[in-house]
Image: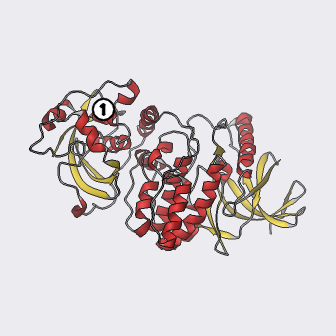
Amino acid sequence: MEEIRRLADRFDLIEPVGGGSMGTVWRARDDNLERTVAVKELLLPHGQGEQKADEAKNRALREARIAARLVHPHAITVFGVIDEQDRPWIIMEYLPSTSLADKLREGPMEVDDVIRLAIQLCSALAAAHRAGIVHRDIKPGNVLLGEDGTVKITDFGISRAMGDVQLTATGEISGTPAFLAPEVARGEDATFASDVFSLGATLYTALEGGTPYGTAENPIALLYRASSGEITPPVKSGILTPLLTRLLDVRPDSRPTMTETERELRALAAGEPTTLVAEEPPPRARKGVLIGVIVAFLVLAAVIAAVVVVLTRGEDTPSDAAPPAGSQSQTATPAPSSAEPSPTPSSPPPSSSPPPPTSSSSAAPPPPAQTPGQALAAYYGLIPGNLQAGFATLTDNFKRTKNQSFERYSNFWKDYRAVTVSNVSESGTTVTATLTYVKASGGTTTERATFVMVQQDGRYLIDSQR
């Protein structure tokens, strides 16, 4: 049997109880307080020099201080941090438990059980947000299910307080791609709203038996799906469906706060009406959304240039859920049909005048994609948050043929909160995909649409719809 190791002449490491890319978690004995604790041994970067190692140590100290701010019955408490054997060790509360990830290997959970679990998680995360703490890595592996039925969120070690100086390298993305909010996958800072999305992705996985982004053999492909907000609509979530749809909204400002989410869950558990009341969100420190989206897609395009991303997945959505033909189709570049509500005979056609002048950042077209199918997914990562960039990806031929104006385009999209793309197939420059529209008023509609793309100045534009 391996000899028990001792830290700081106080903590005896008994056995490893978990681990991952960041390090190993040990069950340990605190001799001073005569109690069992969990000790997380953090791994430092190898072969990157002393500077990187020192940065990692400083980050661990800083993150431990942040995590220690939160004391809540449904969050693992951080007691302290020590520096020994040339690496940091975080001392935490020990909970005899299994992770949600391990439980889900047995299969999906029932809706009522997920609601009870989610209420406990939300109460802790809402308290964290009130304390200015963003978790940044909410996922089933960081949700602990105690032997007594208690649920606790752990691993606030990678969270950070809003406004603190970021010590990670420029461009580094923290979190697991399968549970990342689209804006974080595009390189923006994590916020309270991105925690809400990751919670939604975790609950989705518990209900559906798979992640919202599906599966991919390499993380770049998964990151691409995350950046475009391309999710598979839930089908097993029952009464949780409306809330889950809002949690997974591609637009951060359209998601409920964690406190609102907890309130909604408690109402569902009690069988009460579930009307969300707007409340003032905690302060958010985020980069400009429009500029951030465009810059992030440029960065993502450079990464994906080295990887072939296969976008086909899943089965076609039932056609009986499709919206009227010609009223909702669009592509990765702005979708022609969704941009074009059917005109009434009594109304004169809107003018085809160009959109009003705007700043160059908000009117800039989306960055080039590697394939027409990728252009489709990239477009829906912009809609409806950046309509001017979307409108710029319609060719003059399309606008002329459809008598399309920016005013008409904008008026159509105000009725929708998000669109997801799935089951993409390509034949040359012809792209066919299943489009699922999330209405602003609630509910979804789905259609199968085909578009012809053309290349102009190195990027794909929508030229026509079949």
Q: Amino acid at mark 1?
A: Arg
Secondary structure, mark 1, is strand
Q: Is residue 107 visible?
A: no
Tell me how the rendering is colored. secondary structure
Residue pointed to by mark 1: 459
Which of 309 and 380 lies nearest the eye of the viewer?
380
Total residue callouts: 1
Q: In the image, what residue occupies the spot 18% across and 34% down? A: 399
Q: Is residue 324 left or right of residue 377?
A: left
Q: Is residue 131 visible?
A: yes
- What is the quadrant of residue 347 in the picture? top left
Name above or below for residue 3 compared with residue 398. below
Q: Is residue 191 left or right of residue 18?
A: left
Which of 59 and 204 lies nearest the eye of the viewer?
204
Q: Residue 202, image x and y in percent?
A: 51, 60
Name above or below for residue 365 compared with residue 337. above
Q: In the image, what residue occupies the spot 72% across and 45% down? A: 60
Mark 1 surroundings: few (<14), some (14-19) or many (≥20) residues within 10 A: some
